[in-house]
């Protein structure tokens, strides 16, 4: 099947094959294969140190892989700078949010558009982002450091959306947030997907991640040990025991 631009609509948006990443001589990711198709939420779950963050860093160009390929819309991302990868449509919200606490909320959002060349479009998107997150509009002139954890996570996601991603990479968006706020963030992620942006979601909160994801991968010590539809993984005895505490 071909899409309107001639691209195969069933072809993966992101295709990672045989990815290996090491810190010096210490391997952290040892041959990971994963895919995200257009319109999907794909979760990567796994314990601390499983290699989830390292995998994201290799996709977004922050770390150079030792082996393997990362392709986005059929093109290799090898050797491309992180800002070129953002321009190609892959935008990461890092673990810990990386909000600039001494800039205002509006300034943080504006930074998300730094790779864009269409200034008018970026101004319109700032307006649209403030409309979408009323809490950020109320606090637009406040220093970002005064926001609550949940508001900072919304700001980090809003900032990423300002770059108009085709694929959003989310690293542990639920960390440190109260359950009600976590539910709000996951609801937001579902809405982002419904609007057409694919999502690769790294989470230790396996329960919530499997609830909203279409498919998921389980990472253990740098390797994919299970993969499949999220609903099936949530029913698997191994996942229930190791990641859902059941
Ligand atoms: P977390 O949930 O803690 O972020 P993770 O699944 O994202 O865990 P990674 O952060 O990718 O795991 O870490 C994978 C492995 O690489 C771990 O063994 C970790 O100790 C190691 N590692 C991560 N960052 C570095 C670094 N900067 N230098 C050396 N080793 C690192």
Image (spheres, rainbow, N blue to C red):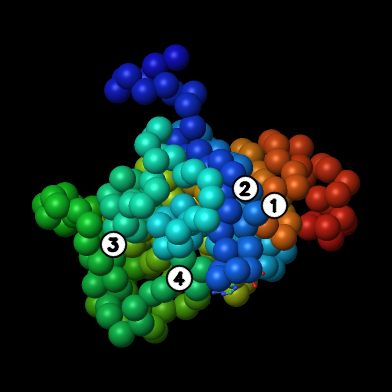
Question: As rendered, which of 175 and 22 lies closer to the eye?
Answer: 22
User: Residue sitting at 51 percent across and 68 percent down?
Assistant: 95
Per the image, the residue denoted by label 3 is 112
User: Residue sitting at 30 percent across and 23 percent down?
Assistant: 5
Name the element at disc 1: strand
Residue 146, given in percent of the width and then of the height, sits at 39, 84
User: Residue sitting at 36 percent across and 52 percent down?
Assistant: 79
Per the image, the residue denoted by label 1 is 223
First of labels 3, 2 by sequence position:
2
Name the element at disc 3: loop
Crowdedness of circle 2 by 10 Å Cα count: few (<14), some, many (20+)?
many
Q: CA distance from mark 1 to mark 3?
A: 32 Å
Question: As rendered, which of 138 and 93 lies closer to the eye?
Answer: 93
Per the image, the residue denoted by label 2 is 32
Name the element at disc 2: strand
First of labels 1, 3 by sequence position:
3
């Amino acid at each position: 099947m071909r899409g309107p631009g001639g691209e195969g609509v069933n072809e993966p948006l992101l295709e990672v094959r045989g990815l290996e990443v090491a810190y010096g001589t210490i391997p952290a990711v040892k041959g990971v294969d994963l895919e995200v198709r257009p319109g999907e939420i794909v979760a990567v779950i796994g314990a601390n140190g499983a290699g989830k963050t390292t995998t994201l860093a290799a996709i977004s160009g922050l770390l150079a892989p030792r082996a393997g390929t990362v392709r986005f819309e059929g093109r290799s991302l090898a050797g491309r700078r992180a800002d070129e990868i953002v321009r190609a449509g892959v935008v990461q919200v890092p673990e810990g949010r990386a909000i600039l606490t001494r800039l205002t909320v509006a300034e943080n959002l504006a930074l998300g558009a730094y790779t864009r060349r269409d200034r008018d479009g970026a101004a319109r998107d700032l307006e649209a982002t403030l409309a979408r997150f009323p809490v950020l509009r109320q606090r637009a002139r406040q220093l970002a450091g005064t926001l609550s954890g949940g508001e900072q996570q919304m700001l980090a996601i809003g900032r990423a959306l300002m770059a108009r991603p085709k694929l959003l990479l989310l690293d542990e968006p639920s960390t440190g947030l109260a359950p009600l706020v976590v539910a709000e963030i996951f609801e937001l992620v579902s809405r982002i997907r419904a609007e057409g942006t694919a999502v690769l979601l790294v989470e230790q909160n396996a329960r919530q991640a499997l609830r909203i994801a279409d498919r998921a991968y389980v990472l253990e010590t740098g390797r994919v040990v299970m993969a499949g539809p999220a609903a099936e993984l949530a029913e698997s005895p191994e996942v229930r025991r190791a990641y859902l505490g059941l």
